[in-house]
Amino acid sequence: MRTVAIVGRPNVGKSALFNRLAGKKISIVHDMPGVTRDRIVAVCNQGKSPFQLVDTGGIGAGVDVEFSSQVAAEVDIALEASDLILFVVDAQAGLTPVDAEIARRLRRVSKPLLLVVNKMDHPNHQGLSGEFSQLGFSPLFPVSAEHGIGFDQLLDRVGSLLPAPDRAEEEARLAKPLKIALVGRPNVGKSSLTNAILQDDRTLVSPISGTTRDAIDIPYKRGAQDYVLIDTAGIRPKTKRSDSVEIFSVMRSESSVKRADLCCLVLDASQGVSSQDKRIAGMIRDEGKPCVVVLNKVDLIAEKTGNKEDLREVIQGIRDDLSFLPYAPLVLLSAKTGEDLDRLFKRIENVREASRRRIGTGILNRLLTTAMTNHPPALKSGRRFKILYSTQPEPRGSSPIPLPEVVLFCNDKSLLDDTYKRFLESRIRQVEPWEGLPMDLHLRQREARGTARAKGGSKSGGKRGPTRAAGSSAVMRRVKGVPRRIQTPVTED
């Protein structure tokens, strides 16, 4: 896809411009210089035809000394891969020596370039753009990323300078890729894993916790399958979040879990499962997301012990600690050595394949009847939970990994407690495990007595009593949504 790179010194509003063109808040916007460190990619669907945007870290000014060389390298890569460059400056701060140095550097790049004068937020600011003509780029494009001013003219010029879109490429873009979020606490190797998958230093890697700040969407093709890898910021407990930028980063990571099609929970094999790992796993479970548990840094265990029994103990301990995610498969790998990455994507495709499997209605009803006969639910206020009929409907929505839904038509859903619900789920999974997929047990309760009379009654004045079968004390009850032919007598509670 045609690519536009956004460059400039820190804090001129590159990320705000990126978000405005992308049409959603992807890059973090903050008045602290140097917040953006990675290349962040999104598609701009504004203008005549879509193009890919790349937001880069700020160049120069000496911020974030630990990462300055890596940020500069990221910018160089973005410039090399782009078809057009947006050079962003700050109208309110005026022309600075750093702007002049960046302009000198960009003149050596043989790519079309547009000078975008940002922060023209008020009509009184119109005269502020004149001094930037000294940089030698014409025409200037005064805009306000905060208020959306000046973007029609900018998009028209961008569209005129970009090469014509490739039709085959556009058709491939419309095929929905699988969005995979790599989540976990800081420093477990999420960015290293992303780089190992891409075989490219696409995201910054450092032993310093919190290196990744944005949730970075990275298109990736493996074989014939398209993916979007979402490398997220490490999620630390609320009491340990150091500043507002980290708070925004964690919020972005949490929102990435919600929009992902599948989550890879990345754990450090050498440290086991921490309480924060459990919280993140709980968040994935509560959002009802397909999940694969990635046990990273297994090479460290091998270096320490060289004993396979120790590794088995670690694996069993992790399974015990994550017992509330019993459906999530465990993948052992090393992002450092690149071992077993194929196994990870095989597991992901297994989860996708499992989402297409269904249990026949007859099999499901016989299974649940046997389970409830052998292990009936406990009485609650003198009544017992009963399943009248069960089925697995066709998947709803357009998700590439739809969750399996089992609908239970029952007498009273308040009689089903969590323990027995887990028991029923475990019995269903014995027939169809649905690897990596949470199950939605959806309860539909029959109408309460008197509802039908209240809605209209009978021809004889609405005093018709229950109809009893000859020679039987059973009551035939009509359950909404259940075909009449499978209605069965239900004894009084």
Image (spheres, rainbow, N blue to C red):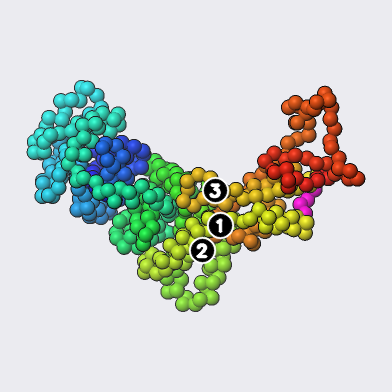
Query: Residue 269's x, y, as percent?
Result: 47, 65
Can residue 363 be seen by looking at this rendering? yes
How many C-alpha atoms fall within 10 Å of the one at disc 2: few (<14), some, or many (≥20)? many
Please give the name of the residue rendered at 65% of the width and 57% of the height, measured from the top-left corner. 428
The quarter of the displayed image where residue 197 is located: bottom left
Separation of disc 1 and disc 3 at Cα?
Answer: 10 Å
Between disc 3 and disc 2, whose residue precedes?
2
Q: Position of residue 204 (x, y in %)?
A: 31, 55
- Give the residue type that dot 3 points to: Pro
- Look at mark 1 in the image and give the residue it sits on: 357
Q: Nearer the viewer, mark 3 or mark 2?
A: 3
- Of callouts 2 and 1, the N-terminal one: 2
Circle 2 — which element? strand
The residue indicated by pointer 3 is 395
**Which region shows up in magenta?**
375-379
Determine the CA span between mark 2 and mark 1.
21 Å
> Within the image, what quadrant is residue 209 found in?
bottom left
Whether 376 is among the magenta residues is yes
Location of residue 327 in the rendering, given as x and y in whole percent from the top left corner: 57, 58
Asked if residue 265 lies left or right of residue 82, the reply is right
Q: Which residue is mark 2?
A: 330
Say which amino acid is labelled 2: Leu
Indicate the quadrant where residue 319 lies.
bottom right
Position of residue 189 in the picture relative to residue 449 (left or right): left
Most foreground residue, 134 or 329: 329
Q: In x, y percent, where is residue 154?
A: 21, 34
For the residue pair 310 and 190, the one nearer the viewer reads as 190
Local crowd size for mark 1, using a 10 Å CA cut-off: few (<14), some (14–19), many (≥20): few
Asked if disc 3 and disc 2 are in contact, CB closer than 8 Å, the reply is no
